[in-house]
Amino acid sequence: MKVLSSKEQQRQQLERDMERFLSRGGEIQQVPSGASGTNPVNGKGHQTVLFNGPRRLARTDLSEVAATIDARKHKPRRTRLTHSRPRRRLIYDDFGEPLRWVWQDK
């Protein structure tokens, strides 16, 4: 089982790592409060990477597909055909003890 370190141990480890980084010539840059790592597009908001291409002018009409799916939802389902097979049923006496098995049609 892996032993989890406490917050104090994690804090001390981070301090040691920072000291080692700085002693090897590393440098820490101060970032002003409120700065963002993303570049704004046209001065307003952020552009999502997934939708950075031009917007398509022609759109596919899916109203018929949606109507077909809705019709399928409201269509009554077919019930299974049950074959009338005899079933075994246990007969009990007045005291709840099993007496015998009988075959019974549904």
Image (cartoon, rainbow, N blue to C red):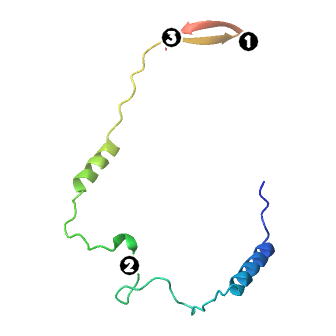
Residue, far left: 58
Q: Nearer the viewer, mark 3 or mark 2?
A: 2
Q: Are marks 1 and 2 in contact (CB under 8 Å)?
A: no
Tell me the residue at 64%/12% (across/down): 90
Q: Residues within 10 Å of mark 1 (few under 14, many from 20)?
A: few
Task: Name the side, left or right, on which 98 lies relative to 106.
Answer: right
Give the CA distance from mark 1 to mark 2.
79 Å
Q: Quadrant of residue 3?
A: bottom right
Q: Residues within 10 Å of mark 3 (few under 14, many from 20)?
A: few
Q: Which mark is residue 94?
A: 1
Tell me the residue at 39%/73% (across/down): 49
User: Which amino acid lies under the numbered mark 2 shown in the image of this protein?
Assistant: Gln
Of callouts 1 and 2, the N-terminal one = 2
User: Which amino acid lies under the numbered mark 1 shown in the image of this protein?
Assistant: Asp
Q: Are marks 3 and 1 in contact (CB under 8 Å)?
A: no
- Residue 86: x %, y % from top left: 50, 10
Task: Name the side, left or right, on which 36 lies relative to 12.
Answer: left
> Is 23 situated above or below 78?
below
Task: Name the side, left or right, on which 44 lies relative to 57.
Answer: right
Q: Which mark is residue 86?
A: 3
User: Which amino acid lies under the numbered mark 3 shown in the image of this protein?
Assistant: Pro
Of callouts 3 and 2, the N-terminal one = 2
Q: Which mark is residue 47?
A: 2
